[in-house]
Image (tube, rainbow, N blue to C red):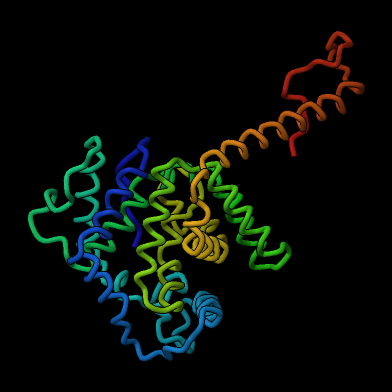
Amino acid sequence: MAPFAVVVNADPSPVVLHVISYLLNDETILNVIKDTMISDDDGEDKSTNVDDEHQQHDDNNNNIGNTNANTKYNNLPFGRRHIEFFDAATASTSSTALNILKNLHSLSPPYPPLSSLHPSSLTSAGLLSSLLLQSLTVVPKEALKGLSSCYASLISSGLALLSGTTPPVSAVASIESALTSSLTPPSASCLLGLSRLRSVAPTSRLRFRFCERLAPHLLRPPSSNVAVLWSVRHQADMRAAVVVCEVIMDNAEVFFREGWMERGRREREAKRGVDIAARADGQDEVAPDSDSGDGGDGSRDGSGIAKA
């Protein structure tokens, strides 16, 4: 279901963190989530492992629209698999969630309890999952502060993991570096909270499906337009995005261990040093052949430097 973005030029992370904290810290709410994570009565083989889930995801995606395909849930869009917590969401719950989030974004922290922003109980699985996913998409630019700036790097690492062209340890290290050098502390707290929420799912199969549903909303191409969700580019990136989402959920505690902000700062400084050196090398290469009347000292503006 496509979200309706209504909040522009806002930092999404504080509101997302408020929603995640509500889901994790209210025992009644957490029990509802647990119940809908385990009530997976879809008749499938419960022994299915994560590798089989990845293959089934690809098979479903390739068979979209093929009613003769041998996939029980080929009616779910974009190759997704059944998980009741997310399947309970409807247009009505999404609209209600959106109104709550609009109210939150109009306020400043500390935010009031979510229950005070809605007249009836916030205990239905559909409304809870809608709150989670809509909170990640209500701001068009990015789900969490800093994710848009490292999207390309994350997808590149995911593709490397899928293709096997890079050792897995190196690809995971690249994902960690991209996150720690780009995210703000509230964004990191959100990923830690999502990792905890995902751990509620009792099996690796359901934990994969949690990532499968979360990834499109969490990782999407940078844009000022929410229509980028499930755009052609987004669909092409989705296999890598799901893999990256799994890596983040599996390793969030490690990625954001003590000292991660200092490591991120060093990463940014090192990258700036590399960029400056590359620009200097580019100037050295083009200056001898320049006929631009630069006075013979090799100086010129950046418009003449070849870009990678």
Left or right, 167 with reference to 199: right
Q: Residue furthest left?
A: 119
The furthest residue to the front: 258
Taking the image as shown, residue 161 lies to the left or right of residue 279, namely left
**Residue drawn at x 40%, y 82% as measured from the top left:** 73
Q: Quadrant of residue 295?
A: top right
Percent coordinates x, y for residue 217 in the rendering: 41, 57
Image quarter where the C terminus lies is: top right
Q: Residue furthest top?
A: 295
Q: Position of residue 270 (x, y in %)?
A: 67, 36
Q: Please name the residue shown 51% across and 83% down the image.
A: 49
Whether residue 235 is visible, yes or no, is no
The part of the image, by quadrant, that contains residue 200 is bottom left
Tell me what residue is drawn at x 45 percent, y 40 percent.
184
Does 285 appear above or below 147? above
Q: Position of residue 123 (x, y in %)?
A: 17, 65
Rendered-image quadrant of the N terminus: bottom left
Report how many numbered discs are placed on residues in the image.
Answer: 0
Q: Nearer the viewer, residue 180 or 4?
A: 180
Task: Establish if 275 lies above or below 230.
Answer: above
| Residue at 20 percent of width and 60 percent of height | 26
**Observer able to see residue 126:** yes
Residue 31 at what x, y percent from top left? 22, 71
